Amino acid sequence: MEVQLWRNATVLLHLKDKKILIDPMLGEKSSFGVFPWTQDNRLNPLTDLPFGPKELDDYLTNLDAIVVTHLHPDHWDATAIEILDKNLPIICPVPIAETIVNYGFKNVTGIENNTTFKEISISITQGLHGIGEIGKKMGTVNGFVFSTKEESIYFAGDTIWCEEVKTAINLHNPQYVVVAGGAATFEIGKPVTMTSDDILALCESFSEISVIITHLEAVSPCTETHKYISGRILANGFSNRCYIPKNGENLTFN
């Protein structure tokens, strides 16, 4: 299995000889503007993709499927809508399937529980994109577990550490968990993605799992940096099973 971080939550998963792109944010730096509920006027995304248009086109041409967890612009942007092949299989939660179809995509599968794609079992999970008022504004978010007979990886999606995540791990028993770190924070309420404390709690609760941390330094609401999180992981003794890939970095797991 290979996991390549492109930027933020956009990850290319290579599993069972299939290439699945998760949460495609494909626009150039600054292409979708300012986030609401913040006084930070920086234009998002804060960085470009780690490769140019030609390499991006090569990647997209060889995809087998797209998976979308939710429709926030740092997971599904206007550029993705414009340039992705409208015939590519797209797997997503049922509530957003119609919206994706309305963008012209012809092969959309909305799932409520699970499905199978090319010998890969794909199960949907629940999460909390914040609590209280900001959680309501963020809306529903989901994750996905991808499993074969040999290996399993859980993309938790934009969620904080919560009972829903614990339940998903206990139910599916993945070897790897991909989390949205960065402690994304707005003017309203508490963080809406995992803080370093959340990530440490996950590691402490599930000692056999490897954790891959994404969603860092690419969008303006994120407040915890790669360096800060790395330091906390090292200080707490989890560096042997926590990975914080750089944009473009490919992680290979046997």
Image: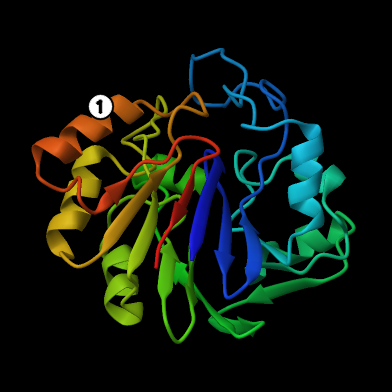
Q: Is residue 192 left or right of residue 142?
A: left
What scheme was used to colour the molecule?
Answer: rainbow
What is the total number of numbered labels drawn onto the structure image?
1
- Residue 122 position, x and y percent, is 54, 77
Q: Observer-nearest residue: 24 or 102?
A: 24
Q: Is residue 30 left or right of residue 139?
A: right
Give the amino acid type for the residue marked by disc 1 in the picture: Tyr
- Residue 90 position, x and y percent, is 73, 66
Mark 1, Cα crowd under 10 Å, few <14 / some 14-19 / many 20+, is few
Q: Is residue 155 above or below residue 233?
A: below
Q: Residue at x 15, y 38 (%)?
A: 234
Q: Observer-nearest residue: 137 or 24?
A: 24
Q: Is residue 30 left or right of residue 58?
A: left
Residue 46 visible in the snapshot: yes
| Res. 45 image quadrant | top right
Instruction: Report the quarter where the C terminus lies.
Output: bottom left
Q: Residue at x 33, y 50 (%)?
A: 160
| Res. 213 image quadrant | top left
Q: Is residue 109 above or below residue 88?
A: below
Q: Observer-nearest residue: 216 or 98?
A: 216
Q: Is residue 103 left or right of residue 195?
A: right
**In the structure shown, which secondary structural element does the residue marked by tag 1 occupy?**
helix
- Residue 130 position, x and y percent, is 37, 46
Residue 141 visible in the snapshot: no
Give the residue at mark 1.
Answer: 228
Q: Residue furthest left?
A: 236
- Residue 190 position, x and y percent, is 31, 36
Q: Residue at x 21, y 56 (%)?
A: 202
Q: Observer-nearest residue: 55 or 189?
A: 55
